[in-house]
Image (spheres, rainbow, N blue to C red):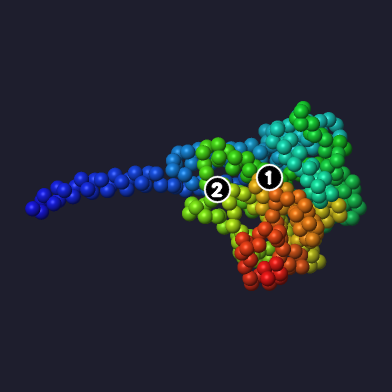
Amino acid sequence: MKRRRLLLLIPLLLFLAILVASLYGRRSREYASDQFLMDTLISIKVYGRDPKVLKSAVSAAYAEMHRIAELVDGFPQPGTAAYNSSDVCRINRQAGLQPVRVDPDVIAMLLLAKKYNELSDGAFDVTVGPLMDLWGFGGDSPHIPPPEQIRSALALIGSRDLLLDSRQQTAFLRRRGMKLDLGAIAKGYATEKALQTLKKYGIRKALIDAGGNIRVLGRNQHDTSWSIGIRDPRKPDGIVAILPLEDAAAVTSGDYYRYFEAGGVRYHHILDPRSGYPATGNMTVTAIAADAGLADVFSTLFFVLPPHKAMEAAARLGGVDIFLVTANRRILHTPSLKGRIEILSGGGYHYEQGR
Ligand code: ADP
Ligand code: MG
């Protein structure tokens, strides 16, 4: 009797085992990988069923990011392969001399940069290179430059003298001494290219975090919005707000990331190309847009503008939401974030829109 029951149980157990195995096989898995690139730790997480596809998608996405990083690298050693493969270096070396043929992605970034230079009345300017060099934020010893040097650097800035020919695929800095710096756009642009690469592999859920440049694809593994924490600009491990995000990018520019202090004043790496000094209106600005390249441009652009102008410009430009903490500790955001963004109390900031 007992034996008969046992014999009946075997096929049932077998069936269950097969069922579990097949469900497990089709279950969505996570694959995550980190790499140090463009001066930051990049992390890519993807979700899907086939581990092999996940892995190849992520490695293709990183390859794309490496390719963009090389094209825009501003500081490779002369004589190295990196020196010759950097389009930005080549354009800078030929400033005042001749146009340079560059990669279509470099043209795309420069076109975007020029467009938003005009739309921001010069607040966003990728020809800020000579001024960045002067302040030394790219190196180990940033310092306040003498005013006369700031004046001469300012004379070399102006995207009007960045000439682009999309048909010939060339870029030209019209005056000798001019210098491109794509620090405000390259990471976001590369992040977007990486995400588009993941999509080509059939990936439908992913998160790329490129040092504060977040781009998500679809919804998260629980099929709800991703939650993005916005860093408190004055508390290293604190968060001021939680932002829900789906199929979009959220990019933050802050004064807490690269800075030095002198005489009780904080000097950071986002410069106002009109004054020659670090922008003073905001501590942190997050821009939310469909495309990570655009969001990167926006985060820097709105950071440079005084808060009320930033709010105005965001409404006028459209296609973007912004969240900001102003220098006088006020929290502001575009109206459509209301009810979606969660503001955490305790940071000592004033938030009036919530009332
Ligand atoms: P992060 O690089 O810290 O993520 P951003 O995207 O705001 O922050 O980029 C800041 C970088 O952009 C600077 O390091 C510099 O290379 C460049 N930059 C600084 N000021 C400007 C500006 N006004 N317009 C365009 N680029 C700028
Ligand atoms: Mg930026």
Q: Is residue 13 above or below residue 77?
A: below
Q: Which of the 4 image quadrants contains residue 161? A: top right
Cα distance in 3D space between marks 2 and 1: 18 Å
Foreground tag (2 vs 1) = 2
- Give, as a three-letter code, the residue at label 2: Gly
Which image quadrant: the C terminus? bottom right
Residue 192: image quadrant is top right
Residue 23 percent across, percent down from the top left: 36, 46
| Earlier residue among tags 2 and 1 | 2
Q: Nearer the viewer, residue 66 or 282?
A: 282
Q: Nearer the viewer, residue 173 or 75?
A: 173
The answer to whether residue 257 is visible is no
Label 1 Cα crowd, 10 Å radius (few <14 / some 14-19 / many 20+): many
x 59%, y 54%: residue: 245
Quarter assignment of residue 72: top right
Q: Is residue 345 above or below residue 127?
A: below
Q: Position of residue 314 (x, y in %)?
A: 75, 54
**SS at circle 1:** helix
Q: Residues within 10 Å of mark 2 (few under 14, many from 20)?
A: some
For badge 1, the amino acid type reads Gly
Residue with the mark numbered 2: 218
Task: Identify residue for label 1.
Answer: 293
Q: Which mark is residue 106?
A: none
